[in-house]
Image: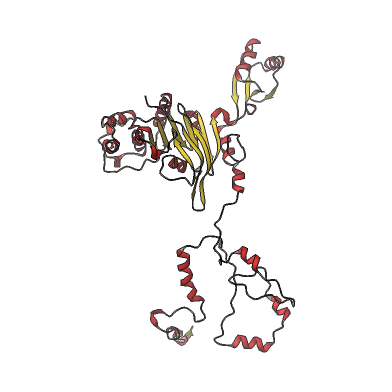
Amino acid sequence: MPEGHVLEFTGVTKRFGAVTAVDDFTARVDPGVVTGFLGPNGAGKTTTLRLLLGLISPTRGSATIGGRRYAQLSHPLQTVGAALEASSFHPGRTAANHLRVYAQASGIPVSRVDEALGVVGLADVGGRKVGGFSLGMRQRLGLAYTLLGDPGVLVLDEPANGLDPEGIRWLRGFLRDLARQGRTVLVSSHLLAEVQQTAEALLIISRGRLVFQGSIGDLTAADEYATVVDSPDRDALAAALTAAGLSHEVLRSGLTVRGADPATVGAVAAAAGIALSALQRRGPALEEVFLDLVNGVRVHESAGAPVAAAEAEPVPTETPEPGDSTEVADAETAPEASADGEPEAEVDGAAVADEDPRADADAEPTTDEEVEGEAGAEGAEPESLDVAPTWDAGQPTTEADLEADRFFSQYDSPDGPPAADGIPESESESDPEADTHSDDEGGEQR
């Protein structure tokens, strides 16, 4: 019988550039139970599983299988069976040959191929090419691959995708049987109802952070549940509950009793000889609790940190190189206005924010002759305008940025951009008179 192993995540963080996909994730998955790994799309589930399987390296922290990283396992396929997607199949290869490739590469007896196909219900189609398989059949073939080495650990990412209702019911019993054998079963999914019927323990992740770890019963507190009971003789039932010291509230659907489970309420009614027409326990649905957890409305004690607090943490940025013009440098190096109220015109490579251009007009009136002279001067260089950058100046400069700067800097020179094909700019410019042509009526248009 294969032996299950404990899966441990310790402070795992994974960053892709400025994006933090997994943030200080710490959790433990024990053998003998089906553990559901829940989270909305983009929460970091698949990234976490890839970290566990050594497909990507963590920025910080560790993920181990039985105390060892995946790369340190002596016989990986006999230790861990993993299926992260159902599309990694050669369409021209048969299902049996697909498994034979992995069996021969891992030193697994070829006889295991037929056994694995039989377990997942593909024994009759082992000779068919995978290109003709439906999505559900591909999912079953992926499960057959995970069972090829008879491992003690199974890691499955969305295994119910593409399965019909019969296939989902089969998968539910299949996973429970594997857990009862002592194996470690970790299943990621966003199908809450299916996980509720299959898993006994849960890991819930949101924005890369763990927001819950424990059993399904630990999701809510006992005081969030109530027992709803009803009887054709409500008055007699209410009197019996009062005599037993159980407070209740009369609703249209029956009597709501808090602080007592259905067994206790049923015993009180039986002792009083009262027939019941309804007896059930009501509380928040898994979907409601799940949404509260991932949105930060509800915070569980098993979570490492509240999601809202995680969003408030500043994202670390790289320190700009000396000489880079940033908004912070602008604020620190901007000179103060001179004594006569005339502000400085330029700051090295940066703009002075909130400067009123009319201040110069108030300080030094300009004569009409000067205005006309400036307007009529040909070839005068345009006055340089400092425009504050709209991008994040603190971002690191790449080689592509430097090449773009060199390209566009030639358009900032007083001579203008270089002429095309070696023709001087004066000759390459079109003659204004050439643009004048006659229309059908003999008039001129420009």
Q: Indicate left or right for 416 with 375 as reference.
A: left
- Rendering coords of residue 391 (x, y %): 55, 63
| Residue at 54% from the left image edge and 31% from the top image edge | 214
| Residue at 39% from the left image edge and 82% from the top image edge | 422
Give the colour scheme shown. Answer: secondary structure
- Rendering coords of residue 152 (x, y %): 39, 29
Q: Indicate left or right for 317 with 425 as reference.
A: right
| On-image quarter of the N terminus | top left
Q: How many marks overall?
A: 0
Is residue 304 depicted above or below 119 in this figure?
Answer: below
Is residue 383 depicted above or below 133 in this figure?
Answer: below
| Residue at 44% from the left image edge and 39% from the top image edge | 52
- In the depicted view, which residue is nearer to us: 171 or 445? 171
Q: Can the viewer see residue 264 in this picture?
A: yes
Is residue 281 depicted above or below 39 in this figure?
Answer: above
Residue 234 sits in quarter: top right
Q: Can the viewer see residue 439 in this picture?
A: no
- In the depicted view, which residue is nearer to us: 142 or 212? 212
- In the depicted view, which residue is nearer to us: 156 or 77? 77
Q: Indicate left or right for 305 with 39 as reference.
A: right
- Rendering coords of residue 298 (x, y %): 62, 37
- Rendering coords of residue 161 (x, y %): 41, 38
Residue 228 sits in quarter: top right
